[in-house]
Image: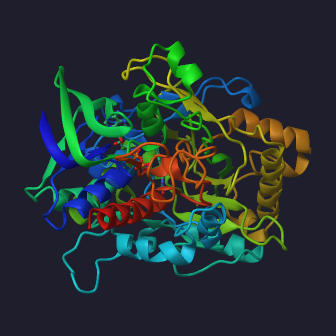
Amino acid sequence: MQEFDYIIVGGGSAGCVLAERLTASGRHQVLLLEAGPSDRRFWVQVPIGYGILFHQKAVNWMYHSEPEAELDGRNIYHPRGKLLGGSSSINALVYHRGQAGDYDDWAAAGNDGWAYRDIAGMFDGIETAPADDSTAPFMQVNDTSADHHDLCQSFADICREAQVPCSDAPLREGNGVSAYLTTTRNGRRCSSAAAFLWPAMRRPNLTVVTSAHVSSIGFEGRRASTVRYRHRGMNHEARAHREILLAAGAVGSPQLLQLSGVGDASHLRGLGIEMVHDQPEVGRHLQDHFGVNYTFKANRRTLNDVFGNWVGRLTAGVQYMATRRGPLSLSVNQFGGLVKTRPGLARPDMQLYMNPLSYQSFYKGKRKLMRPDAFSGFIIGFNSCRPKSEGTVSITSANAADAPAIRPNYLQHEDDCAEALAMARFVESLQDTSTLSTILAEAPLTPLKKMDDDEVLDDFRARGGTVFHLCGTCRMGPDAGSAVVDPHLKVHGLEGIRVCDASVFPNITSANTNAPALMLANKAASLVLADAR
Ligand SMILES: Cc1cc2nc3c(=O)[nH]c(=O)nc-3n(C[C@H](O)[C@H](O)[C@H](O)COP(=O)(O)OP(=O)(O)OC[C@H]3O[C@@H](n4cnc5c(N)ncnc54)[C@H](O)[C@@H]3O)c2cc1C
């Protein structure tokens, strides 16, 4: 059996940061196990490639939720990255910290050390190299607005006309809209692997094994000591002298704990799993952002006219190859931010997306690819910042190869329906602006003004989808009765094991979840290293 100081399970957004931080001093031997392959693939490196990776089994877990009661029994498609970089290798590249209040809420729930004033430096440490070491790895958070589509200027004008705080400089946190920042570097995706893992892989004290699917954690009494995984058709086991760090994401981390006998005893015993620790909180409190897009026909060319035909794609391809710029080097989420749906709210309650492209997402059994609409279109989309509905992730068998059941329970909380309505009415107010009318070829395809509240909500239930921000399934809190890990990310009731990824968020953050996952891993590494000292 191979032996290490630390074993990291999952080489995703969080896992890559952990690997870099824990190996930097050279003092610790670290093993990182990732179920998927390397990220050195063309469509991973090309930013716009996420439209292709969205349904690519080789690099994507491609989960579906169980039928959702409030969505007419629809199964919602949940892509999740399965490769180095994890979901940061297949995501839409938007970088946003959320709001200070998100983290203050974490601290108010008893998580000392996680208020925004405490963790702001951890974000800074992700986004920039420290002043005394300019060669240290960091995540490139890039302002690509100079290359954004001309429509983004109209989007800003629409927001200004509607009295929405609008910034010329891209915002990375808080109230207001602007061009979105992206995780790109020199026209390429800057995933967590590209930013943190690749530089660390040159170090002799880091071992990375890809296509290594971890099936369970081995315990000696209450102490986590080994990791069992399958690699190239063979079973392997590795031992951690210090700690095992789960970074398998909001689906993978609770799944792995349950497979290892840490979860709800009544459920796990029924599957024939030997219990280590009865902890019903594992897999509960699943949260996600759930949103919808309204499509508009434009009276001018949009990105549909680039990606919707061979000539446009070829031209953009040549531009990209020659200059590493143009539409292929960007996200399609080019403009938006956090907005208050009505004056008087203490903080924004809605994330807005204004994309110079329109497309339909297709569900199980239907067309597989996301393709632009066959007209010049754009999108105004939204999701609630802090939805209250909670769901579960639970294994369905003792076999690690079987996907767990994912039940987000979207819109189960009545406040989420009220918020959906408020957000739709807010978009209706944008539809009323004179600036919007100057870029429309015809009346809005979803005529919100003519729809009563029931019709608006029916449409939301019928067409809404995930914004891919699953989190909360191993949540952090001081009390083992309501949380899986403590504020130091140690699993309550066990030793030698922490969870360090988006699954520990005590409540979902207001915006995109990659930046918070990176920050969390940065802080997790500092907690682990402090204990080692
Ligand atoms: C399609 C999509 C678009 C998104 N767009 C954005 C965006 O634009 N901006 C943003 O901020 N966020 C976005 N997100 C969300 C964001 O990327 C995630 O919240 C973030 O990456 C989560 O990080 P993580 O470390 O918790 O999990 P992940 O990055 O998902 O990493 C988990 C890793 O663990 C591995 N793993 C799981 N189980 C096992 C096992 N048993 N054995 C070994 N390895 C295992 C997985 O393969 C994966 O590599 C998007 C997500 C998706 C899927």
In this view, the residue in front, 247 or 146, is 247
Q: Count the marks.
A: 0
Q: Quadrant of the C terminus?
A: bottom left
In this view, the residue in front, 461 or 32, is 32
The x and y percentages for residue 525 are 33, 62
Q: Residue at x 26, y 36 (%)?
A: 226
The x and y percentages for residue 113 are 52, 70
Q: Residue furthest front?
A: 221
Does the rendering let one see residue 364? Answer: no
In this view, the residue in front, 61 or 482, is 482
In this view, the residue in front, 209 or 138, is 209
Q: How is the image coloured?
A: rainbow
Left/right of residue 330 with respect to residue 226 in the rendered view: right
Does the rendering let one see residue 237? Answer: yes
Left/right of residue 68 with respect to residue 359 in the rendered view: right
Q: Residue at x 18, y 27 (%)?
A: 236
Left/right of residue 8 with respect to residue 157 in the rendered view: left
Q: Residue furthest left?
A: 204
Residue 353 vs 37, above or below: the answer is below
Q: Quadrant of residue 422?
A: bottom right
Q: Residue at x 25, y 66 (%)?
A: 323
Q: Quadrant of the N terminus?
A: top left
Residue 10 vs 132, above or below: the answer is above
Q: Residue at x 55, y 58 (%)?
A: 356
The x and y percentages for residue 40 are 20, 46
The x and y percentages for residue 215 are 32, 27
